[in-house]
Amino acid sequence: MRRLSPGRRRAPAVLATATAMSLALFAAAACSPAGGGSPSSGSASKLTLQFTGPPISLNPALGGNGLSTMYTALAYDPLIYLSGDGKLVPDLATEWHYVGEGNKVFELTLRQGVKFTDGSPLTADAAVASMNYFLKAGGGLVSNAGPIDSITAAAPDKVRVTYKSANPDAAMTMTQYYGIGSIIGPKGLADPQSLLTTSDGTGQYVYNGKTSVANSRYDYDKNPAYFNPSAQMFGGVSIRVIGDAQAVLSATQTGQVQFAAGSSATVDAAKQANLTVLSAPFFNWNLILADAAGAVSKPLGDVRVRQAIAYALDRKGLANALGGQYAGPSTQVLLPGLDGYVPEAGYTYDLAKAKSLMAEAGYPDGFPLTVLTESVIDRNTTYSQAIVDALGAIGIKATLHVEATGIGQFSGDALSKQYAAIIFPSAGTDLFQVHNQISAGLFNPFGHKDEQLDTTLAQAFAADGAERTRLYQQASQRYQDLAWYVPVFSTENLLYVSPKLDNVKTSELNPNPMPVAPTPELAWRNK
């Protein structure tokens, strides 16, 4: 029996987090300016946060991750908490370990004396019911939970998760960013629709649907039954929906919000306004060549065309132009420093080689291509337009189809198989997390597979240490050869923090910190 220490995990020194994403993943379903005042305004005992759009869902089984996790993390404790500095910390589970070898059976011991909002106690049976509901609810984060075979109660206080194949990151998948570890109470499970107007978790706060205003403000009241009152630093929390970067800056400058998602366009002004600016690598922006069989766009069925596209992008120039010091060129599905990154591999900018490959494939003059994108995360589609414009250098006449109503609709459009190419970012701290994301959902709407890649990854997920790294690197190289995904550049998460707010921490392993924590040492607080 191999035990993992609650406070530590094997992790790379650099990067994005496994808030990593699935694809309703990184943001809310739409962007709209906030309206109305926050009831927490003017009260030092309350906290007001900003988010780009409304929640994908207030039901944690259907919600998103990244910073949008705040909508569910306030009301639903996870089994394991991922701190801002990237440590795995006991929450509803006090300890955890793999059973046997091969990373296929994972067991958690639950905290005693915890109650849901509905008054019922946290038990293994209750946790199992919530986790099984998550698997069946149809949310966008299911693929990130790993290849689960069964979830059972091994004892009144023990939950056992058995995987169909190896899952080396089981502990990470039980954190607040993955959904399956955010446990819903029996009353909520009996009426999932009720979770859109109230909450039934064990978290520090309880959602107040009566004072909230849809698409504008989401209010949370202090939970009087929380298991560790000393960790509750605020009398209540409100999330304001503000999408425009200048409006976000103004709201943070004037104290309307104490924490917000920043922008490279306003970061200098934020610093001048004495706001604390935190940053950490997060998104790896990809041109997803989804139609690898050429069903919608015949040319993409030729690997030479896909590789030509990969060589045609001046990543360094694009990164400098679009993000300055907060962006960098990306040549692989993993970012530098991650377990599986291959320093000498990756596509470089080679326009002559790109044109030669296009000619070999029979498309010396290029071809038309419609590319699906969205304007929620890629504000004003600045990134997407720059990427498709660059394809003109090899004759590809690319046009954008922009989905502006939200990530949910964007994901639906991608899954419709009408679009041969898609632009969207991925994220993850190792190849297990990244592969879970990009092998399904809007990253792979046509369901392409590769036996060599799958075999290598299966071996890697069951391995440890240097052997896992070696196999991860083989898989990274195979991803490059297939050219299903063309990484372009990475961007850092920028966060603005009020000078009156303390203990907000971010890191390469968690660029999306949450205000609540199971211990006062990790929780945000007013100065």
Image (tube, helix red, strand yellow):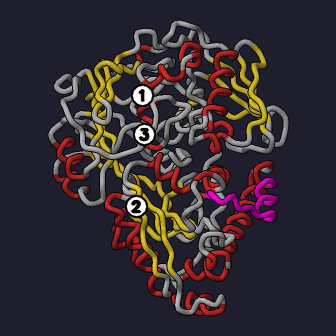
**Where in the figure is residue 453, as x and y percent of width and height?**
76, 63
Query: Which residue is rendered at x = 49% and y = 41% of the image?
Result: 65
Image height of 360 relative to 116, above or below: below
Amino acid tagged 3: Ser
- For label 2, the residue is 402
Q: Which residues are magenta?
A: 444-459
Query: Which residue is rendered at x = 49% and y = 59% of the image?
Result: 424
Amino acid tagged 1: Val
Q: Quadrant location of the N terminus?
A: top right
Residue 68, which numbered label? 3
Q: Earlier in the sequence, mark 3 or mark 1?
A: 3
| Mark 1 neighbour density, 10 Å: few (under 14) some (14–19) many (20 or more) | many
Amino acid tagged 2: Val
**Where in the figure is residue 91, as x and y percent of width and height?**
56, 24
Please tell me which residue lies in front, 185 or 112: 185
Please tell me which residue lies in front, 305 or 514: 305
- For label 1, the residue is 516
